[in-house]
Image (spheres, coloured by chain):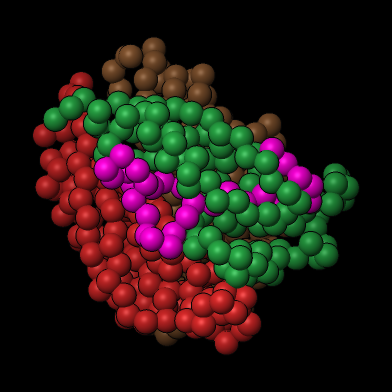
Chain colours: A red, B brown, C green
Amino acid sequence: MADLRQHAASLTVALGTGPDIRDITDELNGVIRESGIREGTLAACVVGSTGSLTTIEYEPGVVADLKAAIERLAPPDAYYAHEEAWHDGNGHSHVQAALLGPSIHLAVRDGRLRLGTWQQVVVINHDNRARQRPIEVTVTGVGG
Amino acid sequence: MADLRQHAASLTVALGTGPDIRDITDELNGVIRESGIREGTLAACVVGSTGSLTTIEYEPGVVADLKAAIERLAPPDAYYAHEEAWHDGNGHSHVQAALLGPSIHLAVRDGRLRLGTWQQVVVINHDNRARQRPIEVTVTGVGG
Amino acid sequence: MADLRQHAASLTVALGTGPDIRDITDELNGVIRESGIREGTLAACVVGSTGSLTTIEYEPGVVADLKAAIERLAPPDAYYAHEEAWHDGNGHSHVQAALLGPSIHLAVRDGRLRLGTWQQVVVINHDNRARQRPIEVTVTGVGG
């Protein structure tokens, strides 16, 4: 078997006021291509406590439905203790991001992410202002 | 130290109309056995945007309670924008799966998953019809 | 490139009655230091079906807000089928933990976790009694 190796990369994604959702599947497949890895895993994590990663069918309906569900989990207009000290209006953002989680770990097969036909990887900005979101990507596997 | 290596496998799990929940711990331990890896990690991800993975105490009560909680997160009978274009009745399935997340990453110790005594790995089908769910598994570690 | 290697460790964290939330960032960075790995990934998973892992800004306000949101996801005083057979009063704990998820996978860069300035890794005990929570940590990468 070929030796196991690893490739690290950083992406930065511009996102609007939260909840904003962006498809990053192409960018992640680009990192895999750069790496030359054919089979293994891709780990991605969002840097910052008001972002999250998951997969969805990236079409406008699901995007709108997921935003609505996220706002139900932690409504912007509810009371947040975070505001007592910080007054930055993003108490809901912190809670939403913590519940969804900052990391995802997917399979690489045949040199690309092994996803369903209608499944894309998305980054979510939960913050109450537009943000540049750094995402750290690590591909581990064999191939080349 | 022995060289780090990797073993990839695919499972397919038959699941009923969502939310349906199945214990896949034995299948995952089988993949680890095949790999000969004694210490490392197991990454699993469900292929498709209406499935998810997590761990629970797999007993009928918790299974029923988790199904009820999932249905509260995104009730089947609510309005979903996804239906406007797709009319396939599974708007809630997409939202539920995105909130739970498609991937899990567990420790392999002594040649098997290191879980609690009452902790099992489960795959969840959120779709509004029975599905064959592919799950990609990658074991990375040392041993043998 | 230096050879890829792996380092495994176990932490045990004392937590109070759930939901209780503890910052484990320093402990995880300690495991990375021990490993000598400079670039790669850290996978952590909580052993037991009533614990979870995520990241937050670890300040008292967000901690209180996240606890409140977790209790809304599965309120302690609701009906749980788990109680019919087990009578241990922790049906809500199982549901909360399953929704948040037991595992996290973060980037290691320059010999430490690559997190935002206001982002810490936390373990959550959802159980209705104080628990010693084992956490399995695996660092994979290069360096030294």
Q: Toward the viewer: B58 or A127?
A: A127
Please say whether residue C115 is one of the residues in the magenta stretch. yes
Residue pictured at 60% horizontal, 79% vertical: A84
Q: Quadrant of the C terminus of chain C?
A: top left
Q: State the image quarter where residue B17 is shown.
A: bottom right
Query: Would residue C66 be found to the left or right of residue A48 on screen?
Result: right
Q: Where residue A46 appears, x then y in whole percent?
A: 35, 59
Residue sitting at x 44%, y 23%: B39
Res A25 → quadrant: bottom left
Q: Residue at x 57, y 41 (%)?
A: C46
Q: Could you tell me if residue A47 is visible in this image?
A: yes
Residue A4 location in percent, x, y? 23, 28
Quarter location, residue C59:
bottom right
**Tally of numbered tags:** 0
Furthest residue toward bottom: A77
Front position in the image: C100 or B86: C100
Can residue B44 be seen in this snapshot? no
Compared to residue C19, the image places residue C66 above or below, namely: below
Specify whether residue C63 is painted magenta: no
Q: Which of the pair A20/B57 is nearer the observer?
A: A20
**Residue B75 location in percent, x, y?**
61, 74
**Is residue A2 or residue B133 the one in the foreground?**
A2
Residue displayed at 65% across by 67% down? C64
Q: Residue A98, image x and y in percent? A: 51, 62
Magenta residues, as a range? C104-132
